[in-house]
């Protein structure tokens, strides 16, 4: 006994839109990847220093600790 052949389903998204999406994704992969200067993780392109979000947060908290300790030393 043979099963019935299912007809090919019609695509939900037009082929033109799929091609545009594929080109947009491939363009994102071609962008230069910037590595964090501390840990080597990928970074966002925002900011002057190449730091990942973790290292940036650690730097900010270190600044806060230094600012809190300075009045105690004076």
Image (cartoon, rainbow, N blue to C red):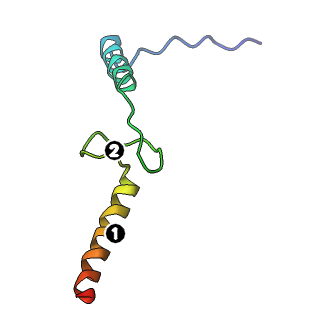
Q: Nearer the viewer, residue 71 or 15?
A: 71
Residue 45 has which mark? none
Taking depth in this image into account, of 26 and 42 the one nearest to the observer is 42
Q: Which residue is mark 2?
A: 50
At 61% from the left edge and 10% from the top edge, which residue is drawn? 5
Which badge, 1 or 2, comes first in the chain's sequence? 2
Tell me which residue sits at (37%, 63%) in the image: 58
Label 1: element kind = helix
Q: Which residue is mark 1?
A: 62
Whole-percent x, y for residue 51 in the image: 36, 49
Quadrant including the C terminus = bottom left
- Residue positioned most to the right: 1
Query: Residue 69's image quarter?
Result: bottom left
Q: CB atoms at circles 1 and 2 under 8 Å apart?
A: no
Residue plotted at (35% across, 13% down): 19
Q: Nearer the viewer, residue 4 or 42?
A: 42
Q: Position of residue 9 (x, y in %)?
A: 47, 15
**Residue name at image x 26 percent, y 89 percent:** 72
Q: Nearer the viewer, residue 65 or 73?
A: 73
Secondary structure beneath dot 2 equals loop
Mark 1: few/some/many CA within 10 Å (<14, 14-19, 20+): few
Give the tally of numbered discs. 2
Circle 2: is it few (<14), some (14-19), or many (20+) Cα within 10 Å?
many
- Residue 36 picture quarter: top left
Placement of the N terminus among the 4 image quadrants: top right
Q: Quadrant location of residue 32?
A: top left
How far apart are the alpha carbons under marks 1 and 2?
17 Å
Residue 24, x across and y down, in percent = 32, 21
Residue 56 lies, in percent from the top left, at: 34, 56
């Amino acid at each position: 006994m043979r099963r019935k052949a299912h007809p090919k389903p019609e695509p939900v998204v037009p082929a033109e839109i799929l091609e545009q999406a594929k080109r947009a994704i491939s363009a994102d992969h071609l962008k230069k990847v910037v590595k964090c200067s501390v840990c080597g993780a990928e970074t966002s392109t925002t900011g002057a220093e190449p730091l990942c979000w973790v290292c940036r947060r650690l730097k900010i908290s270190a600044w806060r600790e230094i600012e809190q300790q300075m009045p105690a030393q004076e």
